Image: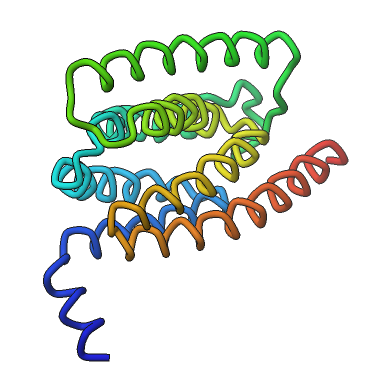
């Protein structure tokens, strides 16, 4: 127990990021707009964590998270065109948008992997590029309240669990075990909420 407490104290920034991240995902499952405030706190904390761990692409991703959180906050408030419905409804991914996002993901992966491989000392450039590319797309999707973003997160979270254990980020690895479970719950709840909105 003392070893765990010492680890928490020593890695207090990572701990703050972990707690804020869990609150963020809980609130996003409930489709609460306040999820974005905790997303910003988490992203700022993890800028420092990932810089220390040499996860440079993932660190850069945190700056994107800050920006997309502000955008998501605004879109969830003002993106609904139906003035009779207060809450922004859950949307589904179309075939056309799926293809566009696939192309974007591949393009991002090629750029990030090239930069990480040639200009940084990242120990896992391809995996870092892979998870970063998908995370960018998935976060944009949640800002647009698209259901299928949860599926992408499940894939990303499972890969990241292994990467964080490899880098000794044990608290963060635990966070992503929780994330994986919660992503499954989030997918089910968002899917069910979409069905309810179709009936009303």
Depicted 190 relative to depicted 21: above or below? above
Point 44% across, 46% down: residue: 160
| Colour mapping | rainbow
Identify the residue at the far right of this view: 199
Q: Nearer the viewer, residue 22 or 112?
A: 112
x, y (%) of residue 42? 28, 50
Q: Quadrant of residue 118?
A: top left
Picture coordinates of residue 81, whole percent (x, y): 61, 21
Relative placement, left or right, of 46 versus 149 is left
Position of the N terminus, as image quadrant, is bottom left
Q: Which quadrant of the view contains residue 98?
A: top right
Q: Is residue 83 above or below residue 161?
A: above
Residue 78 in view (yes/no): no
On-image quarter of the C terminus? top right
6 sits left or right of 123 in the view: left
Tell me which corner region of the image, top left, top right, bottom left or bottom right, holds residue 84: top right
Viewer-closest of 22 and 169: 169
Q: How many marks?
A: 0
Give the camera-side residue of 10 and 116: 116
Give the answer, above or below, for where 181 lies relative to 108: below
Rendered residue at 35%/19% (across/down): 113
Whole-percent x and y of residue 49?
Answer: 19, 49
State the image coordinates of residue 145 (x, y, percent, origin top left): 58, 33
Q: Is 1 left, or right, of 175 in this rendering?
A: left
Q: Is residue 168 visible?
A: yes
Residue positioned 42% across, 64% down in the render:
174
Identified at 68% across, 47% down, the residue is 187
Considering every residue shown, the one lying at the far bottom of the view is 1
């Amino acid at each position: 127990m003392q070893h765990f407490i010492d680890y928490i104290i020593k890695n207090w920034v990572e701990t703050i990021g972990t707690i804020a991240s869990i609150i963020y995902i809980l609130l996003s499952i409930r489709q609460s707009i306040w999820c974005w405030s905790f997303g910003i706190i988490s992203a700022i904390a993890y800028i420092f964590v990932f810089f220390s761990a040499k996860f440079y692409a993932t660190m850069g991703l945190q700056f994107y998270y800050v920006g997309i959180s502000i955008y998501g906050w605004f879109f969830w408030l003002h993106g609904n065109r139906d003035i009779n419905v207060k809450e922004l409804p859950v949307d589904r991914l179309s075939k056309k948008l799926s293809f566009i996002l696939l192309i974007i993901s591949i393009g991002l992966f090629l750029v990030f992997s090239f930069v990480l491989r040639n200009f940084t000392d990242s120990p896992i450039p391809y995996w870092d590029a892979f998870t970063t590319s998908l995370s960018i797309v998935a976060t944009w999707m949640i800002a647009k309240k698209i259901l299928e973003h949860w599926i992408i997160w499940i894939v990303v979270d499972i890969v990241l669990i292994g990467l964080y254990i490899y880098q000794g980020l044990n608290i963060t690895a635990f966070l992503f075990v929780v994330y994986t479970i919660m992503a499954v719950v989030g997918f089910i709840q968002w899917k069910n909420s979409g069905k309810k909105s179709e009936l009303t």
